[in-house]
C-alpha cells in the first residue's frame, strides 16, 4: 500500500451503522430509509446489493444532529379519512400511522419522526393537509386542530410568564415590585409562582397531583 495515500474507512453493515448511531437495528433502518435519496443519504455511493453505509457520511450526520437546535421544525403531513379511520403520513418521508383517532395518530407520527430526524418531539410543528369525503368531517378536524394549537400557545404563554417572574426574582426584584412592573395585581404574581411550584412538584412525581396521575 502507498503510505502517501490515506486508507479509506471500510463500509459499515446495517448493524455496525446502527451501533455507531446508538440505535437498535430496527430504529436505525427506519431512520436511514427516510434519508435515502436526500442530501443526507447515509448509504455508500455506488454500492450494489445489500445496503452498506458510509462511515464518513454517518459521522458527519451524527455531528450535525449533536448541535442543539430548539427552533421549530415544520413538517408537511397529509391526514386522510377512509370512513373508518385516519391515516397520517409525512409527505416527504416514508413514515405513516393509521388509527381511529386523528390526534392520537398525529402524536404517534410525531414520536416516529422525532426518532427519524433525531430531534426533540416538542420542536415538530405539523402543516396538515386534510382529506375527507364530507365537509362536516373537515370542519370538525380543523376545529380540533385549532383547539390543540390554542392549548399549546396558552401553555407556552404560561411558561414564559413564569420565566419572566423568576428571572426578575433572581435579580432581586420582589413579587410586589414585579406586579407593579407588569401592571398586574400582587395576587396574580402569587398565583403564577404557586403554579410554578405545583408544576415542579408534579414533574418530580412527589406531589398529590402526580401521585393521582400515576394511580390511574
Image (cartoon, rainbow, N blue to C red):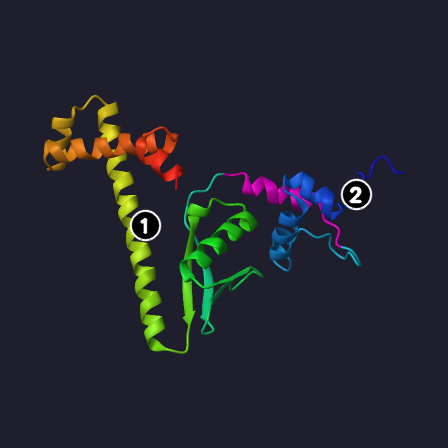
Q: Is residue 147 above or below residue 209?
A: below
Asked whether residue 171 is in view, the answer is: yes
Q: Residue at x 81, y 39 (%)?
A: 7
Considering every residue shown, the one lying at the far front of the view is 215
Looking at the image, residue 95 sits to the left or right of residue 69; the answer is: right
Residue 129: image quadrant is bottom left
Instruction: Return the mark for residue 50.
Output: none
Residue 72: x %, y % from top left:
41, 49
Residue 208: x %, y % from top left:
31, 32
Say few, some or many: other residues with alpha carbon within 10 Å of mark 2 (under 14 / 14 to 19 / 20 or more): few
| Observer-nearest of 124 and 61 | 124
Say few, some or many: other residues with alpha carbon within 10 Å of mark 1 (under 14 / 14 to 19 / 20 or more): few
| Observer-nearest of 72 and 156 | 156
Q: Is residue 62 magenta?
A: yes
Q: Residue at x 11, y 37 (%)?
A: 184
| Mark 1, secondary structure of its residue | helix
Residue 114: x %, y % from top left:
51, 49
Q: Is residue 48 magenta?
A: no
| Mark 2, secondary structure of its residue | loop
Magenta residues span: 51-67
Instruction: Read off the residue under disc 2.
Output: 10
Considering every residue shown, the one lying at the far top of the view is 172
Q: Residue at x 32, y 55 (%)?
A: 149
Contact check, label 1 and label 2, Cβ < 8 Å = no
| Observer-nearest of 59 and 107 | 107
Instruction: Return the mark for residue 152.
Output: 1
Amino acid at each position: 500500500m502507498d503510505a502517501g495515500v490515506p486508507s479509506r474507512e471500510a463500509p459499515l453493515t446495517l448493524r455496525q451503522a446502527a451501533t455507531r448511531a446508538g440505535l437498535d437495528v430496527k430504529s436505525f433502518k427506519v431512520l436511514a430509509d427516510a434519508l435515502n435519496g436526500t442530501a443526507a443519504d447515509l448509504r455508500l455511493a455506488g454500492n450494489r446489493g445489500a445496503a452498506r453505509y458510509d462511515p464518513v457520511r454517518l459521522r458527519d450526520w451524527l455531528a450535525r444532529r449533536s448541535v442543539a437546535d430548539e427552533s421549530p421544525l415544520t413538517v408537511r403531513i397529509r391526514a386522510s379519512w377512509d370512513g373508518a379511520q385516519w391515516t397520517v403520513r409525512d409527505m416527504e418521508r416514508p413514515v405513516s400511522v393509521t388509527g381511529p383517532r386523528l390526534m392520537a395518530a398525529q402524536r404517534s407520527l410525531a414520536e416516529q419522526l422525532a426518532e427519524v430526524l433525531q430531534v426533540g418531539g416538542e420542536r415538530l410543528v405539523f402543516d396538515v393537509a386534510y382529506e375527507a369525503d364530507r365537509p362536516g368531517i373537515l370542519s370538525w378536524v380543523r376545529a380540533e386542530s385549532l383547539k390543540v394549537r390554542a392549548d399549546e400557545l396558552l401553555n407556552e404563554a404560561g411558561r414564559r410568564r413564569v420565566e419572566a417572574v423568576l428571572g426578575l426574582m433572581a435579580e432581586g426584584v420582589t413579587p410586589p415590585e414585579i406586579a407593579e412592573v407588569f401592571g398586574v395585581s400582587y395576587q396574580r404574581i402569587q398565583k403564577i409562582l404557586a403554579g410554578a411550584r405545583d408544576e415542579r412538584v408534579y414533574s418530580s412525581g412527589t406531589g398529590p397531583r402526580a401521585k393521582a396521575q400515576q394511580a390511574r
